[in-house]
Image (cartoon, rainbow, N blue to C red):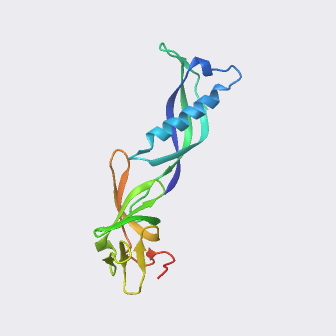
Amino acid sequence: MWWEISLRRDVIVHPRHMDPSGGHRRWIIQTLLEDMEDLQCSREHGYYVAPTTLSKVSGGMIRESGGVSYKVDFKCMVFKLIKNEIVELEIENVKQSGAEASCGPYTAIFLHHSLMTGFVYSNENGPCFKNSDGVVISKGCAVRAKILGGQFMGDGFRCLATINDAHLGVINPEG
């Protein structure tokens, strides 16, 4: 789920941010934060959460177009769900075909109705799934689920999850 990985990026510092006392490192860090925010995620690493450690900054190379380019080695926290991992999901939306859920930066996790054995769709008091024990899956509830798989879609991941296994289901059901 959470990993710290090593990455390398080229970071360009504009001449106005250059400081002989080393203050340009602040701009390098700010640029890394902005780059990671823009990058968001990759198939290989999952979601980039934040740079954590600046490991090495190479000697800068002056660019013809202005500024100085540095090769920067750094560590970054990433979040990636893996197949068969047990996670806590928050239900975001319920419809007849199933429930849409989120977990951290993953906002497109789907619990298909066939992967919630014993639960039936109801729209009595708002859309939800109920079982014979009175346990309800509705918007805002927490569910422990197993990730069955995921697909990288370029701008994020889409995952499929199930509650059909031991110790899975609604956490602290209100009944």
Identify the image quadrant of residue 128: bottom left
Residue in the foreground of this view, choosing between 14 and 51: 14
- Residue at 67% x, 26% y: name it: 23
Left or right of 97: which side holds 14? right
> Does residue 127 lie above or below 22 as drawn?
below
- Residue at 52% x, 36% y: name it: 34
Residue in the foreground of this view, choosing between 121 and 21: 121
List x then y, in percent, for residue 58: 58, 26
As drawn, the residue found furthest toward the bottom would be 133
- Residue at 45% x, 71% y: name it: 143
> Does residue 5 lie above or below 26 as drawn?
below
Left or right of 138: which side holds 33? right
- Residue at 46% x, 48% y: name it: 47
The mark tally for this picture is: 0
> Does residue 71 lie above or below 158 as drawn?
above
List x then y, in percent, for residue 100: 37, 63
List x then y, in percent, for residue 157: 37, 52
As drawn, the residue found furthest toward the front would be 125
List x then y, in percent, for residue 104: 48, 57
As drawn, the residue found furthest toward the top would be 64
